[in-house]
Amino acid sequence: MRKSEIKRKTTETEIELCLNLDGSGQTKISSGIPFFDHMLCLFCVHGLFDLTLTARGDLEVDAHHVIEDIGICLGQAIKEALGKKEGINRYGQASVPMDESLAQVFIDLSGRPFFFYQGPPLVGQLGQFDLELTAEFFRALSNEAKMNLHIHLLYGENKHHCAEAIFKACGRSLRQAVCLDPRRLNIPSSKGVL
């Protein structure tokens, strides 16, 4: 089982999480931001990742610190759980419709962080969740997991549907990238290292 535990404490946030890449989509998530908890749950259910996460932070300021720091911790957990990345597919891609919205996500677990978003601006509030923080979360995730992460929101009108399509597509794409290929016994790179 490829698992990791991460703890991070700053003057702004305190986060503890346990991640199992070879899970079944079981979650126990408490960030203090219910809509974001829902999105993380969808990410895990569609990625078949088990995640236990508790986060506390300065939500009286806004949700930025908590959401970004969860991205940092989850990215670190992915990187740690993957180890040397021997036998993984490395690449993943997924397209997910959610009613009138369509998202595509492409991932390369290359060891090189790069985040790119293309699509309608993600703005507005869903409960305590500021949609602009979607990009901050995924940028932090990409940086700490050391992966290329390209998100394309092709179209969408309902903000909830747009966010849901993105998080589901990211989970499915990452699941594909972390899956083990029984034919590959080494690191999936001509360099011999990722």
Image (cartoon, rainbow, N blue to C red):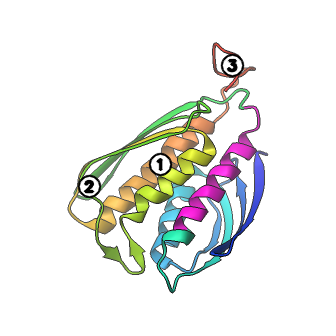
* Percent coordinates x, y for residue 110 in the rendering: 59, 30
* Percent coordinates x, y for residue 162 in the rendering: 31, 59
Is residue 152 visible in the rendered image? The answer is no
Q: From the image, tell me which residue sits under label 2.
A: 101
- Pick the quarter of the image with the N terminus: top right
* Mark 2 surroundings: few (<14), some (14-19) or many (≥20) residues within 10 A: many
Q: Are marks 1 and 3 in contact (CB under 8 Å)?
A: no
* Three-letter code, disc 1: Cys
Give whichever of discs 2 and 1 has the lower sequence position: 2
Name which residue lies at 41% across and 56% down: 135
Q: Are marks 3 and 2 in contact (CB under 8 Å)?
A: no
Q: From the image, tell me which residue sits under label 1.
A: 170
The stretch of residues the image draws in magenta is 67-84
Q: From the image, tell me which residue sits under label 3.
A: 183
Give whichever of discs 3 and 2 has the lower sequence position: 2
Distance from the alpha carbon under mark 3 to that under mark 2: 36 Å
